[in-house]
Image (cartoon, rainbow, N blue to C red):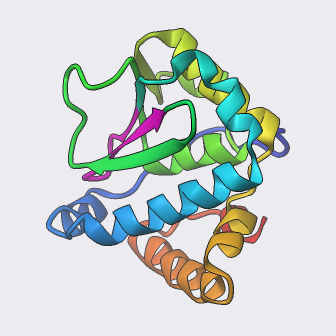
């Protein structure tokens, strides 16, 4: 569902990437594992839509952040693994682009085709895997704010507020829509 899609993705400034680089991945891993479990529990259709890719990984690598995410599907689950960078052969397909653009793809505020053809994002490997992931996410109509709230309950507002303030101070361009949807 795309409404009021923005025309160009926000990018984290170089200083934000530099500040994030030395931070440990464990807190991000814990948040993403919890979020993935919550999203897959609330949207079991994601698992079904990615059935053709069970046993394989799909990589997501922000070009302006010092981490990458591997989505690993199996017959019983979808799991996320956080790494510093994607290995050359650890995935069937990978999508790369600015972090905020990738988040915008997840919640539908950016058009994937427009980002691809404008070269804001790139795809390596099996394009069908990326399309399957995109279609699964689009059909599930994931709302990051609701998913985060479902996963972290009363702490979600505090965590989202702190993240929003940090992103605003680092980039000055974070769209209010991203955190208030």
- Please state, as top left, top right, bottom left or bottom right, where the N terminus lies in the image: top right
- Residue 153 falls in image quadrant: bottom right
Whether residue 90 is visible here, answered yes or no, is yes
Asked whether 103 or 69 is in front, the reply is 69
Query: Taking 18 as reference, is 68 above or below it?
Result: above
Q: How many marks?
A: 0
Query: Taking 159 as reference, is 44 above or below it?
Result: above
The residue that appears at 22% across and 19% down in the rendered structure is 89
Whether residue 117 is visible here, answered yes or no, is no
| Left-right relation of 118 to 46 | left
Per the rendered image, the range of residues in magenta is 59-73
Residue 177, percent from left and from top: 73, 63
| Left-right relation of 66 to 31 | left
Asked whether 90 or 4 is in front, the reply is 90
| Left-right relation of 96 to 101 | left
The residue that appears at 58% across and 89% down in the rendered structure is 158
The residue that appears at 22% across and 69% down in the rendered structure is 19
Query: Taking 75 as reference, is 160 above or below it?
Result: below
């Amino acid at each position: 569902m795309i409404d009021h899609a923005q025309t160009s993705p926000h990018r984290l400034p170089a200083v934000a990437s530099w500040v994030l680089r030395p931070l440990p991945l464990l807190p991000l891993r814990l948040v993403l594992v919890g979020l993935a479990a919550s999203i897959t529990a609330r949207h079991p259709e994601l698992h079904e839509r990615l059935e053709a890719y069970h046993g394989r990984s799909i990589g997501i690598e922000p070009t302006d952040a010092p981490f990458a995410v591997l989505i690993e599907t199996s017959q019983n689950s979808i799991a996320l693994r956080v790494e510093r960078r994607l290995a050359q052969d650890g995935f069937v397909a990978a999508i790369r682009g600015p972090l905020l653009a990738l988040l915008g793809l997840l919640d539908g505020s950016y058009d994937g085709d427009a980002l691809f053809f404008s070269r804001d994002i790139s795809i390596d490997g099996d394009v069908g895997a990326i399309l399957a992931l995109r279609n699964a996410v689009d059909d599930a109509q994931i709302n990051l704010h609701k998913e985060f709230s479902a996963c972290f309950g009363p702490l979600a507002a505090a965590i989202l507020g702190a993240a929003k303030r940090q992103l605003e101070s680092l980039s000055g361009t974070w769209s209010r829509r991203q955190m208030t949807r």
